[in-house]
Amino acid sequence: MDADDFLDKEVQSNVQRYEKMLRNKSQEFFEAEALEDVCDYYIQKEKLKRALEVLYFGEELYPNHVGFMVQKASVFLAMGKLDESLEIAENAELYEPFNSDIALIKGEVFLNMNRDEEAEAHFDKALLHTDDRTDVLFEIAYAYEETNKLSKSAEYFELIVSENPDLEQAYHETANAYDLLGQYDKSIEYINKLIDMDPYNTSAWYALGVVYTKKGDFEKSIDAFEYCLAIDEDFTAARFNKANALVELDKYLEAIAEYKTTIERDGPDAVTYCNLAGCLERLDRNIEAREFYKKATKLNPNIAEAWFGIGLTFEKEDRLKEALQFIKRAVVLEPDNTEYLLVLGEAEYKMNRIEEAIECYQDIILLDPMMMEAWLDWSYVLFVENKHEEAIDIIEKALKLSPDNHLLHYRMATYLYAMSKIRQAKVHLETALSINFDDHFLIFEIMPQLQNVSDILSLIALYKEKNEKF
């Protein structure tokens, strides 16, 4: 159904009459309220220039009509023309000093100018002179949300709840505000209040599942999605997100069943195929996984995740030449995806394409210097190629960015021992052991022969004793 179908018939008629006038380059008479409705129609369609044209036409018929001034200030605000919006609002205020709509627009303008105290004063004025306090409170809350001043937004939504305890929208918006703030427990509190009011509210159960997912409490998120599905088994988004939560708990077989049901009920979808394939891949069912990834690419040839997944299944089968072409295609589609580049670098190295592998690691570092896996893999390639000094240089650069990263210190200790730089190696090994003793096995990962070095074993024993004491 087209959005226009929901318009009042009179508004539709006025819009059609206005547009016919423009096409015919004729002149029609409109009541001021009719033009305001036509302007609102274009604002809702985000056709702001067309809305301004309506207002200019209206001003010719009705000079100094305050309603047009309010709308024009609103349009300029939406266009980011704050000074123009404020000037028009202040002019309108001369005619109607107690108009709450004018005070509200001025408050929004000042908020966008980061003049928060002035904004608050005008919001208070709007509330003082309005006949619909709840609507104005919503507008104020949304204004704070749109300017990313989320604590104030949540404050106003909470106020709406306290004044309108039976208004479901207020609970939804308050929960959403705390969700945006990352205060998930507060968000859950308000969703639960809404569920207490209406236990069969599927959108509330769904929202609860989403927030629990963000919190990392996947068992509870699954419970919430299951309640949602118990009320409405065709709520596809709940089923899809339940499957995602099952994946997080490594319950791949259950997730596969949910993804398949999602496809059966809602039809084929590239993302769902990818997620399903990912579960199969984790279960080492690579041939099946590859088939679902291919189905995803047929639905959406630009879905990089699917091409990458196909490449991974080939890599697991040591079919590196085939893997490379698919991983490269994923990189072409998402050249800034550092995960794809990291896997591509590893595949290039396995194919003995050393320069190409190093280029991948260099690209990753340019995109994300803090991706320590890239530094480690880059240094490893150099080390295996007997470029020990260059490998050490790479780790030194990484340590400048992340001096407390124990993985880097273990790796540096390994390289230094390999070059018989024992004193320096011990310094890095002790640093690594003090930061994270549990990963001490990493010192042997590249050079297992270090398990026969008494100095290393003594240091590990010493730090094990210290670790056990604490």
Image (tube, rainbow, N blue to C red):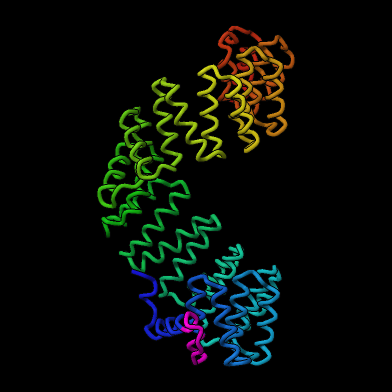
361 vs 124, nearest the viewer: 361
Q: Give the camera-side residue of 437 and 167.
A: 167
Q: Residue at x 47, y 26 (%)?
A: 324
Q: Quadrant of residue 110?
A: bottom right
Locate residue 223 relative to residue 181 in the image: left or right: left
For residue 11, side relative to residue 127 (left or right): left
**In this view, 77 is above or below 338:** below
Residue 59 in percent (x, y) is at: 60, 88
Residue 470 visible, this angle: no
Q: Is residue 54 something one can see in this rendering?
A: yes
Q: Nearer the viewer, residue 393 or 409?
A: 393
User: Image point 32% across, 41% down: which residue?
Assistant: 255
Q: How many marks?
A: 0
Q: Which quadrant is home to the N terminus?
A: bottom left
Residue 185 position (above or below residue 10): above
When the figure is inspected, residue 371 is found, relative to residue 144, above or below; the finding is: above
Quadrant in the rendering for residue 233: bottom left
Q: Quadrant of residue 108?
A: bottom right
Specify start and end residues of the magenta stretch as a single range. Answer: 21-35
Residue 351 x, y percent position in the rendering: 51, 18
Residue drawn at x 70%, y 16% is 425
Q: Is residue 32 magenta?
A: yes
x, y (%) of residue 443? 60, 17
**Going by the image, does 316 lie left or right of 180?**
left
Q: Is residue 23 above or below residue 170?
A: below
Q: Is residue 138 magenta?
A: no
Where is residue 456 shown, x and y percent of the image?
Answer: 64, 13
Which quadrant is home to the C terminus? top right
